[in-house]
Amino acid sequence: MSGWRRSGTVVAAATVVAALVFVTHWRAEHRVLDPEAPEESPDVTPSPAAALSLIAAPITVPVAPLAAELEEAIPRRYGSLDRRLDVPGHDRTSIAFTLRRGPLDVSFHGRSARVATTVRYAMRAWYDPPLLPEMSGSCGVGSPGSDPRLRLIVSGPVTVGSDWRLRTRSRVAALRPASSLQRDRCTVTFLDIDVTDDLVDGARSFLDAHAQALDSAAAHVDLRRRVSEWWATLQEPIELADSLWLVMQPESVTRGTVTGLGDSIRIDLAMRARPTVFMGPRPRLPVVALPPLDTGTVAPALDVLVDARAGYDAASRFLQRELGGVEVAGMGRTVRLDSLSIFGIGGGRLALEVRVSGDVAARLFLTGTPHVDPTTGRISIPDLDFDVHTRDLVLATVSWLRADGLRQLLRSRAQWPGTDVLGWVRARLVEGLNRDLSDELKVSGEVDEVRILGVVATKQALVVRASARGTAALSVVQAGS
């Protein structure tokens, strides 16, 4: 008997509490069921994890500075007419010669550097016959306009070292008479000996020893300074709009092929970066020093991670247009959806406020976690359900309102498109990827595809995470352009 009394007391107490809740939230003057709003939680926004991208950064190096370096490094004269050299296969014969090179023609073709020049020479020959006085002769001595000539070509492959300097491995590719004319042959007439080939061999040994001058001069072309300036520029945030920033976040630089363009060489570089779009105040990121040059495949591909904020007002207006005025019938009763409004409550969750009229006037709250369809970009709340305050009040007053009809309707139709976000992302990125970054550096790019990866609800806005794919390249801004 005592147990029954205690049980009855509990039931009575629950009834009193329910009645108090009902009296509190059922405003008699308006006859509106008015539960408390959902409780808020701290916002939890996952940090972006940007994909690794390659931003093309080709460098064009003109030949002129390298040619000037070589002009200084390679002697213009070699040999002496007073220094006798033995002639192999010709006993008692000796020669002396001088070489005078002309201007250097420096060019790049394919992946090789090429240095060509015309070498003029003069030679003396001596023959010491048995029992007779020594005889001598010469060619190219005392006749500057008719001295014999050789054509010299030095070449070698070009690469870029990890220290950011040009690297070549030069060798004498060709050394021959400049023409088939007799003037470019050296014949000692009194001996009837053509010593042109002997002279070529002597000149080749000298030139082989100096071919490394090209390698040394090439190593003086240091790309680090220019790339360092670009590297520093890319670490600066790019303002896309008010409180919207594109941050490249470069990590390393990869070298590709070196291509000769005649009077210049093009070095294909690509910067590995993790471009991300941030919203809010100007990002402050740590400065990263230019690393050593890396190797790898240079195939420019841009993959930008974007966190775009979509205000709740647009979503609320869309839901109002789609569902405002819809009637829901069930259990012999009908309610009409008068207004719908969506807002964030923290913890990655949304709340939907629905005002209804008909057999009951009420303000209802449903909560859930947003989801985005990656194919259509449509945002929904598949787990939408009555908030705890709304559920308790409805149970204590008009429990029929909890029938699945209303909840299922809102789950299936409380959706809105994310196409506006896609267009906004594309437009902002195209603008940000086509501009002058500094007085000498320009970025140009294209956005081929934008797709939504996910969505996170915050109290202020819906954060739509998107990925934009395309290409981007750096180039030097020409003066006056």
Image (cartoon, grey):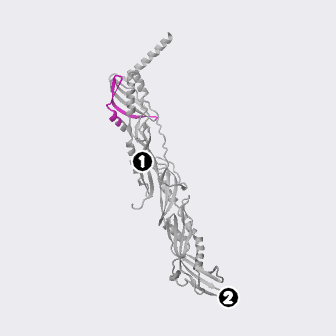
Q: Nearer the viewer, residue 111 or 253?
A: 111
In the rendered image, residue 77, in percent from the top left (x then y), is placed at 56, 76
Q: Nearer the viewer, residue 109 or 394?
A: 109
* Range drawn in magenta: 318-347
Report the front residue among 442 and 338: 338
- Magenta span contains residue 327: yes
The residue carrying mark 1 is: 449
Q: Residue at x 52, y 57 (%)?
A: 255
Instruction: Please count the marks in the image.
Output: 2
Q: Secondary structure at mark 1?
A: strand
Q: Is residue 239 rendered to the left or right of residue 214?
A: left
Q: Identify residue for label 2.
A: 130
Question: Residue 67, how many percent across, how many down?
Answer: 51, 69
Q: Secondary structure at mark 2?
A: loop
Q: Could you tell which of marks 1 and 2 lies nearer the N-terminus?
A: 2
Circles 1, 2 touching at the beta carbon (< 8 Å): no
Helix, strand or loop for the magenta stretch, by majority: strand
Q: Work out which quarter of the rendered image holds the C terminus and state it.
A: bottom left
Q: Verify whether residue 345 appears in magenta.
A: yes
Query: Marks 1 and 2, how far apart in space?
Result: 91 Å
| Residue 124 in view in this figure | yes
Placement of 150 over or under 446, stated as above or below: below
Considering only vertical position in the picture, is 167 above or below 335? below
Q: Position of residue 39 (x, y in %)?
A: 44, 30
Image location (x, y in percent) of residue 465: 44, 42
For label 1, the crowd category at 10 Å Cα-Cα, with few meaning under 14, some 14 to 19 and many 20 or more, is: few
Looking at the image, residue 286 sits to the left or right of residue 364; the answer is right
